[in-house]
Image (cartoon, rainbow, N blue to C red):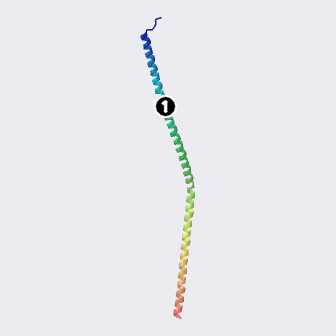
Amino acid sequence: MAKPTGSTDSQELRDLRQQVDWYDEERRKTGRKLTELEQRVVLQEREIASRDQRIQDLEAQIANLSSQISRLPQVDVQLTKFKDEIVQMIEAYDQRRVQSQAEMEALRRVEHESNVREIAD
């Protein structure tokens, strides 16, 4: 078997060194890419946590609005009762006003008749 010459050995060493350098560069690229992907995962986890919180806030608002909406018929009933009470109060006031005017008119007639009698006497 023939021994390799010095130039072939050094060529092989250069080739091996180039391969090692290439593998080393690929490892660095992979490391950078892995770091980049890890950072993206962290950002996405934060976004997911933020969105989860927002979803919880929206669900709480929906629950609050749902309870308020469920009370709307009760509010309508209360408003109707209030309106009916106001109408009754106005009618009662109007009746008292009419009665008061009638009493005032009767009192004026009595005074007028009294004055007429005094003048006639």
Q: Position of residue 25 (x, y in %)?
A: 45, 24
- Above or below, 73 relative to 108: above
Relative to the observer, which residue lies in front, 91 or 31? Answer: 31
- Above or below, 11 relative to 73: above
Residue drawn 56% across the image and 69% down it? 89
Number of residue marks: 1
Residue drawn 44% across the image and 16% down it? 15
Instruction: Answer few, some or many: residues within 10 Å of disc 1's Cα (few below 14, many 20 plus, some between 14 and 19).
Output: few
Residue drawn 45% across the image and 18% down it? 17
Q: Position of residue 79 (x, y in %)?
A: 55, 61
- SS class, disc 1: helix
Relative to the observer, which residue lies in front, 53 or 66? Answer: 53
Determine the residue located farthest toward the top in the rendered image.
1
- Above or below, 17 relative to 86: above
Q: Position of residue 26 (x, y in %)?
A: 46, 24
Left or right: where does residue 17 sit relative to residue 61? left
Residue drawn 52% across the image and 89% down it? 115
Relative to the observer, which residue lies in front, 6 or 98? Answer: 6
Q: Position of residue 86 (x, y in %)?
A: 55, 67
Left or right: where does residue 54 sit relative to residue 8? right
Q: Of the residues shown, which amino acid type is indicated by label 1?
A: Thr
Relative to the observer, which residue lies in front, 86 or 31? Answer: 31
Write down the residue under mark 1. 35
